[in-house]
Amino acid sequence: MSSSQPTAAPDKLRQRRLGPTLAAFVIGLPLSAAILWPAYYGSLQGTLLARYVSHPVEVAEVILFCCALGALAVKLLGSVAGNAALSRQLLPAWDGRPVPVSEAAQLLAEVEKRPGWLRRTLLGQRVSAILEFLRLRGSTSELDDHMRALGDNDFGNQEGSYSLIRFITWAIPILGFLGTVLGITDAIAGVTPEQLEQSISSVTDGLALAFDTTALALALTMVAMFCTFLVERLEEGVLQGVERFVEMNLGHRFERTGAAGGEFVEAIRQQSQVLLQGTEKLVHKQAEIWGKALDEAGKRRTALEAEFQSQLSTALAAALDKSLAEHAQRLAGLEKQAAAHTAELTKKLEGLGKIADGLKAQAEALNRLQEGEKQLIHLQERLEQNLAALADAGAFQEAVHSLTAAIHLLTSHTSRPTVPLRKPGAAA
């Protein structure tokens, strides 16, 4: 019964361990809710954060980014725990002399006494698997192959654990471009010539909102790629540390049968070189994949920008042509209205000219009356002078005759009919 417990223990530890795929949703969804809730309903409404999460595509980008952060956080915690495990005393001290394979069960029992977090690390699982293999086989035959298989499995699991993170890193820029295309479509579809006449800001605001999705996607992608690079390098360091620990503490700890020691050491050295070369190839391959992905993203972005500029230029040219045609029609109508108003004003001015002629005739009549009054005043002055002369000379009879003649003359002047004044516009 006691021999079956160590076998089940590593499986239970693996089941309890939270994987990056599950952590992406367990951690990422609450984290995205904690970011989006204040921007929509909390104290961050109207801020820059609320602007960059206003579009549904931007919300999807933030959710995917938080899922990637959740997966990276679990992997980062695992790497930190793995580094801490490398500094702990997982196995009892060894003096360098080979020991019987039967001691593998005792070593496995010692490992089971270590804390749970230490046994759940990559180092604890690798050591437990090797000791369990030795306990069940009872010999070191095929131990090297088993250790290489465990190492390859760990490297393969590490590479496969980044599948969801790489997919999210690839999907976020695609969502950004999709949001830009949808935003441009909405901005152009709602444009009318009247809006272009009044203000073009309604179009530019829509385009700015459309490009926010791409800007946010590129920023989140860069952050996710940088964090992935750091965590991946940290995990690679942990894997290399585990390989060194296993080779130093378990590779030569037990007595070997059937193979010469020199050949075994040489085989281990060759396998280590192959492992290092494989790691370098993986790193170079990963760098090439990221470089190609970035180049393709840049080409797609350039093509989308060129297509958008062409569509925008065409739409603006058509809208401006239509607006100019409508302006020309309106100007022609205004010219016709101005000509009609000018004709009416000309008719009114002709009537005013006739009234002015009548006023001029009345002014001339008034001038003639004023001249007649001046003549009367002059005759009165002459009459007074004549009367004075008659009084002085004593010729009263002649004065009477002169006075009579003057009266007749005055009467003839005053009996002339006067010209009546006519009102402007009255009939003659």
Image: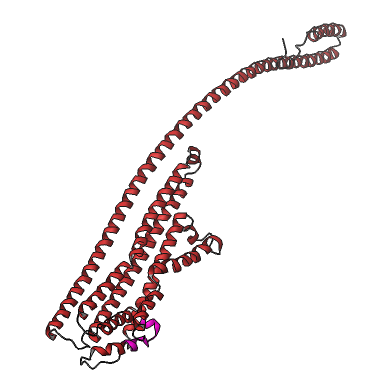
55 in relation to 309, above or below: below
- Residue at point 36% right, 72% down? 75
Where's residue 108, x and y in %?
32, 86
Q: How is the image coloured?
A: secondary structure
Look at the image and tell me in which quarter the N terminus lies: bottom left
Residue 120 showing in the rendered view? no
Residue 118 lies in the magenta stretch: yes
Look at the image and tell me in which quarter the C terminus lies: top right
- Residue at point 71% right, 14% down? 365
Where's residue 372, x and y in %?
74, 14
Where's residue 152, x and y in %?
25, 73
Residue 239 lies in the magenta stretch: no
Say left or right for 419 vs 324.
right
Q: Quadrant of residue 79?
A: bottom left
205 in relation to 407, above or below: below
Q: Quadrant of residue 157?
A: bottom left
- Residue at point 28% right, 76% down? 239
423 in relation to 76, above or below: above
Residue 362 showing in the rendered view? yes
The span picked out in magenta is 108-120
Where's residue 319, x and y in %?
43, 37
Picture mark count: 0
Query: For this rendering, which residue is in front, 67 or 399?
Result: 67
- Residue at point 24% right, 62% down? 288
Specify the principal SS of the magenta part: helix
2 in relation to 339, above or below: below
Say left or right for 248 vs 266.
right
